[in-house]
Every structure is written in structure tokens, then in C-alpha cells.
Image (spheres, grey):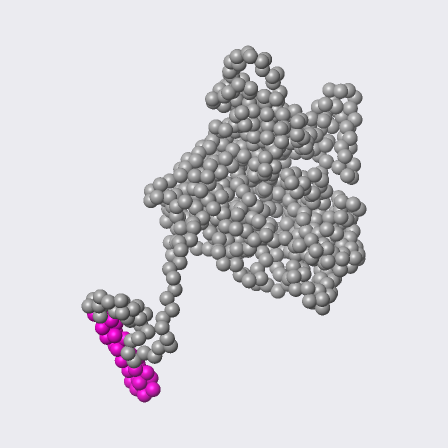
Amino acid sequence: MMLRRRGVSSIVRAVDASWRWRCAQIQSFQSIESSNTASDERALQRHIHGRSVSNFSTVGEPCLIAAPEVPSVWRTFLASGQVFQEEVVVGEVKVSFETGKLARFAAGAVVVRVGETKVLVTVVADHKLDAGKDFLSLQVEYREKQYAQGKISATFMRREGAPKERELLCGRLIDRSVRPLFPRSFFYDSQIIANVLCSDGEQDPDVLAVNAASAALMLSDIPWKGPIGCVRIGRVKGKFIVNPNMDELSVSDLNLVYACTTEKTVMIETQAREITNQDYIAALHLAHAETTKLIPPQLELAAKVAVHKRPLPVLNVPPEVLEKVRSLAEVAIEPVMGNPLFGKFERCQTLGKIEEDVRNVLVAESDEVSVKLLPYAFDAVKKEVMRRNIFDKGIRVDGRGLNQVRELQCDAGTYPSLHGSSLFSRGNTQVLCTVTMGTPDDAQRLDSLVGVDRKRFMVHYSFPPFSINEVGRTVGLNRREVGHGTLAEKALVALLPPEEDFPYSVRVTSECLASDGSSSMATVCGGSLALMDAGIHLRSHVGAVSVGLVSVSDPATGRVTDYRILTDILGLEDHLGAGACISRPQGSNIKNIQRVTDARISVSGDGVVTIFARDQASFDQAKQMVEASVGKEVEVRGTYLARVVAIKDFGAFMELNGGYQGLLHISEIAHERIERISDYLVIGQELSVVCIGRDLRGNLKLSRKMTLPPPMPGATQLPVPLVTSPSAHVSKFKQNLT
């Protein structure tokens, strides 16, 4: 082997320098041991820093940095082995929250347990913010490893690989439940990881993971606006079941997953077998009442851990900047928003040109603050114009009315050589659906901890980048595609013939060829056409549409004061304030009320409900059903009938008609002093209460003693329990639910 001379010399010099450095260090430490003077101590500092060692060049005296102070922690770290735990009974199942034992370095770590099923969820958020970043980067990962059920993975490497379809769907379930409650100005990279530790096969871990994610966020330093609770509602033989086990869920005609805060709904996901709207509303009411039981344990757990939330930068556009951008852009934006002559891309390009013109004006005026905040201010002005058109004129972005559906085009048997095919278009949204039938052996094999091990009906949704005129990669499983396909699958599978009559495997594919909103709902319509084109006898056709909600809220209380419902929303409408994807017909609830009460009901365009009845009893019944369906605004000093949904040491949580909830404090139950609330109230009991106001967060405060006659002066008040037969109330409550 031949070495270059220059390289050998470099190696020799490096070795020689290293040797001299080590000798100098040895001499330094020898001088440390023999030196007792102050000058020797100063020499010691120089030697330790290596600044005055021979054969090394020096720039000057070393600059010693003072030791930093220990920063304050965001929470009280538990002693080794110390565990905090809270429990609550939801339905007939005990749910426990635990922290302190596992993953102590995570910003938040909680284990939620039901039976022998345990799920660990950890939360971490970066403390360094990337410059110029103006969106939340939230990763949610859900994993089910085979050790959780005592098995070794059947893969070649005997270990888990990429996330499976079910894991992606469970991750989306968590994401859609927690993401809306992150502050608008929180742009730090964040990650939620859910890991199923063990499973007894009785409970689906997905709902447990949502609750654990909420609790972990509450224990972290992230300024999250939770907590939330999450439950699953099933129905077997007409009886609702809270958090059903897998056997009950397999025969249930309803699979409702519901997440909410104390007062407001956050996420709903439903699969049903043609249940009535009235039954669905009853399920929602039950779900909300049971879900809110999961919120107090999380608050109590966070109080024990003593969490300190990190400061949050305020993202507000100054009024003067907003007014300046409004004066420059509003006149130009108004002809674009509401003009049917503008298509999706023409509208986008025109709005982009207007924003660029405004930027040029601000740059010419050297207004650096307005230039920096222009994207936020311009977006706010667009939203103002769109919402003003909706509320004042009843006009949508593309000129449609609020309940007007875009033009429909349907074509079945598009490709005769396929088993089944269809081309469905709604406005500019276009999907091509195909159907392929196979033998029972062609069913998809599932490798999940719970549920069935095979699936004979599959809907696969594809969203290529050309459908929105973009360039992108098309490899691997896409979370959005998996989620949209499953959404359409849930709408179609209930109408298939029974397996004993139709044992074949069926695959529906949906190729999104052009997308301007509601492509997943177009998949439902196109899939229904393609299935019938294939000769599969569905019980009926399936129709689906995306519906958005645009609302106005009171800034002080957060309560919705006005709203409009948009049928068949566009992508821009979804971005600027409309959401909530549903696939059920409008008006059937009104028809049911009219059928039951024999009253006539009409709803005007501005939301006014008019009831015509033949007598007072029919009118009162119809009014009560309407208020129960849409919710009646709770007024201070108003008297309402409420039901006890949860009992705590400090009071009871009550539910009013319309889904409103409030706290009946222990001091407001009766005039006399109360030691134990359970002596006076039981879950399910109904009683009259008075709304006495709201707390700082806008939650209702209720009083029962204001409905009671005042105590006589000087008379001795004997505590008479309000409940004489708890079992009677409980049984009556269960009968009502049934």
C-alpha cells in the first residue's frame, strides 16, 4: 500500500499534537495536586480550559460563563413509583386514568384502562418555533402491536411494519377529536402517540385512546382548550348501550362515536342500519350525557400534577391593519365572492391577484407591519365578505342559494367490460366508480386486536394530485384516502344483501377525477350507481351530501347566537368557516314531529319555526319536541327541567333540554346544609332548576333551592332527603332510555 506523503505528514502531526496535549493535561493535573495558592488556582482554570498549554496558540484569557439558573418546570414531577389515578363509571363500565408510572419524560403521558384493555398515549410539543411557520404541524400515531394480545407478528421479520388501515383510521379519530381545540396561534411541531399496551378483546381501544389523548394534553404544557370525553353508543334490540363490548357491537344497528367538551360537540362518527332520525337524536343526547362524565376526572388529575402551561403568543391582527386592508381589498373581493361566472381556479387566481395588488400598495407605503400581517388580514376580509353574503343576502360563494345543490350528472355502465361502473358529477366534482366481484376467498384479511378477521366489502378511494391541478407523489397509503374510503364504505355496506344470500366479495374503487368539495359524498352516490350496475340488489339507492354550518357566537360566552346551514359545500366554503360532513336527508325530523303530534310545522329561511295545532295539548307536545331537537337558548333566571347526569363531591352536573349542561353546586341544592349529595340526588333524577348565571368559561350555573319556598324565619330546618327510593329513579331512567 502506498500513502501520499502529504497525508502521512498530516497524520504524524496530528498524533504528535495529541500526544503533547495529553502530556500537558497530565502536567496540569499534577500541578493541581501540588498547588495551594490563588495564583495556582488561576493557572488551574487556564490549564483546564487548555488555553495556556505549550505548543498551542492562544487568543487571550478565557471567558468564563456563569452557571445558569435552574429553569422552572411545567409540572410537578412525581417521585419514583408515585402514581396518580382517577376513576369514573360510564354506562356500566369503569374507566380509569393513570399517570406517573410510564413515559415520565413525555410532556404528558396517560394510561386509560377499561377491564384488561390499556392504552398509553404520550404528547410532546417542540419548544423551538420555525421562522415564518403559520400552521399547526400535528402528528397523531396509533399503533396496535401483536404483543398486546399475546401473539408474535406473522410477518417475515416477525415485527410490525407500516401502520395498517385500522391504525390510520384510529389515528384520524384522535386527530379530529383534539385538533379543533388547539389555539389558533399554536404553531409548534406536536406529536401524539397512542400505543395499545394490552387488550382483552372486549373493548375497542380507539375510544380509550381519544380519552387518553385528551388527558395527556391536559397534563402537558401545551395550552390546549380541553378536556374532552369520548364514548361509543350501540343499540341492540332497540336498547341503547354505552361503550358496548365487541360481541354487542357485532349485532348492533348503530355504531356512534361521540366526542365533546362540557357543552359543545367536537366530533361525531356514525355507522347505522337505517335508524330513524328521532332515534339518532336520542342517541346523541345519551352520548353527550355519558361523555361529560369523563371530563371531571381529567381536571382532577391535572390539578394533582400541578401543570404550568407555556405562554402562548397572541395572533391578532391590529384593528388599524385590518381596516387598512379592508379599505384596499373589500371592494375588489365582493364581485368575486358570489359570482357564478367564476370557477374554482378562476376565483382562486383572481383573489390571489387582488392580494398581490394590495401587497404592492403596502410595500410602496413602506408599511412593514401590514405587509407582514397581510395573509391573515386578507383572509379575514374574504371571510367577512362570504359570511355577510350568506347571512344578509342568502348567497353562496358560487352564487347558489343556501340549500341549493350543484348540477348533477350520472352515467351508469360507463365501461361495459367491467362488472360495474359509473361516472358521477356534482358541479365540478367528478368521480369514476368501479365494482369488482370475487369469491369469498378474495375478502380482505384483517389483523386487528379486536373485531372481525375478514371483510368482504371494501371501498377504496383515490385522490390523485391532478384532480386539483397539482403535482404530487402517489405512493403508499394516504391517511385522507383511507378515511374518505371508509366514510363511503359505512354508508354503503348497510344496504348490501345478507351474506348468506350474497356470499361474494365486493370491491368498489373511486377515482376522484376532479375535486371542488364533497368528493367523499360523491363516492357514495357513484358507488351506489356502480353496485346496481353490477347487478347487486341493494335495498335502495344511497344519497349523500356534505353540509356546512356557518355560525355567529357571542364573544363573551361563546354561545352560538345565529347560524346558517349550507348544503353541498365547496372547498373554499369549507376553508372559510363551514364544516360538519353528514349524509342524511333534511326535513324527516319535522315530518316525524308532525306525524306524532298531528301539528303542522313550517321553517322560514331565516330559521323561524311556526307551529299550527288543533288544540293546546298538540301544540305543547310539538313545541317540546322541536325544542328538544334544536335546543332552546337558556336564559338567566329562567326555570327549566333538568336531569342529573353526574354527581361529584362539590355538586351535580345537570342536563337540560337541547343538550345544555350546567353545574348544580352543593350549596344550591337546598336551603339547609348538605353533607352528602348522594342522600339527595341520584343519576337520572329529574328536577326543576333556575339558571343563575354563567362562570368565567361560560358554563351554566344552576340552583334548585330557588325553586323551593323560602324557609320560615326562626324555624328549624330538618334535612329531608329529596330521594327516598334511588332504585326507583334509576329503573325509571333506564326505562326512558330504552
Q: Residue furthest front?
A: 38
Query: Who's the residue at 28% across and 82% down the image?
Result: 12
Magenta-drawn segment: 1-30
Q: Is residue 221 above or below residue 260?
A: below
- Camera-nearest residue between 207 and 433: 207
- Estimate the x, y position of residue 575 in percent, counting from the top left: 66, 52
Asked if residue 596 shows in the view, the reply is no
Give the image quarter of residue 635: top right
Query: Who's the residue at 53% across and 38% down the image?
Result: 229
- Estimate the x, y position of residue 540 in percent, counting from the top left: 67, 40
Q: Is residue 8 magenta?
A: yes
Q: Residue furthest top?
A: 715
Asked if residue 689 shows in the view, the reply is yes
Please state, as top left, top right, bottom left or bottom right, where the C terminus lies in the image.
top right
- Estimate the x, y position of residue 392 in percent, counting from the top left: 78, 45
- Camera-nearest residue between 193 and 77: 77
Give the image quarter of residue 1: bottom left
- Camera-nearest residue between 533 and 191: 191
Query: Who's the residue at 69% across and 26% down the image?
Result: 624
